Image (cartoon, rainbow, N blue to C red):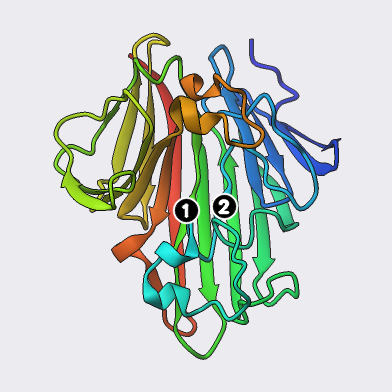
Amino acid sequence: MYNETLPTVEQLVVDELVCWRVHTRHAELLVAQQGAQVLSYQPHGEEPVIWLSGQAGYQKGKAVRGGVPVCWPWFGDLRRNPAQVQGMHQGGPICPAHGLVRELEWELLNIDTDGPAVHLAFTLDSRSPLLPGWPHAAKLRLDIRLGEQLQLTLSTHNLGDSPLALSQALHSYFAISDIREVEVEGLDGCRYIETLEDWQQRKQQGNIRFSGETDRIYLDTPRRMSILDRTWKRRIELDVSGSSSAVVWNPWIDKSRRLSQFDGDAWQGMLCIETARVMDDFLVLKPGDEHRMELKVSSKPL
């Protein structure tokens, strides 16, 4: 039955992190202010859609395993990024994986309700002294809207007087019944980079199925991709804009043992499909320009 008091938003502290819990008539959402990171998303009466590690740590200055981390201004290993993106970094030899903003405290701009939906907006100024080695003027904003679906919009505004080159991703972890039973639909015919085999370029044939560690960068991706989960009798649909690349990742057994904040068997119940601007889809912003990358996540019965 619909609760007339909904939607509700409450602030709470989980260990060391300030978080926001949102309840609507459709779902529950948990967001950490550090990294503006969605931690969990679960429609009422369903299994979670966004996966959060059972071993997740909530410590200041450390990324939380799971949810939807924001990777910016580069993705993965900086040395594997295009030369233009590498050239933006002017710091020392230590460059953290997935950029500089996952472990920073973002500013909460506002919380609004729109009928049964809730909208949270976070922002981060790249001129912060907390971003050493990246002396460029840019404003980041993440808009999170929870209604009948979850909508994330990452905006970058170049406030400087020279072009800005970067790669980025919404590093989404999805909850699934069993990685060996699910399929990813929508990438048939796309070229991809097989990072586990000397970064060879290949072409996807049919749906993606999983039988071992997977770490692929898909290029020329469509606006919609789906996770087919017949055990849980649902389809997770990902609708994207402002992005033409995606990363599909599952660590499988051996790598799981080396990951932090990760149970040894957690690989079975998670799958990353990361909305991205990476490799030759990297982003170049002229002075004054703004770019928006959007991901909409919905769960539908099969």
> Does the CB distance between marks 1 and 2 fall below 8 Å?
yes
- 162 versus 261 height, above or below: below
Which of the two discs, 1 and 2, labels the residue nearer the N terminus? 2
Q: Quadrant of the N terminus?
A: top right
Q: Secondary structure at mark 1?
A: strand
Say which residue label 1 marks.
Answer: 169
SS state under label 2: strand
User: In which quarter of the view is residue 99 placed?
Assistant: bottom right
Residue 53 x %, y %: 63, 28
Q: Residues within 10 Å of mark 1 (few under 14, many from 20)?
A: many
Name which residue type carries label 2: Val
The amino acid beneath tag 1 is Ala
Residue picked out by circle 2: 70
Q: Residue at x 42, y 11 (%)?
A: 232
Q: Is residue 88 visible?
A: yes
Q: Nearer the viewer, residue 223 or 210?
A: 210
For residue 26, say whether it is visible: no
Residue 90: give x, y in percent of width and height: 58, 81
Residue 278 against residue 270 in the figure, above or below: below
Rendered image quadrant of residue 163 = bottom left
| Residue occupying the far bottom of the picture | 161
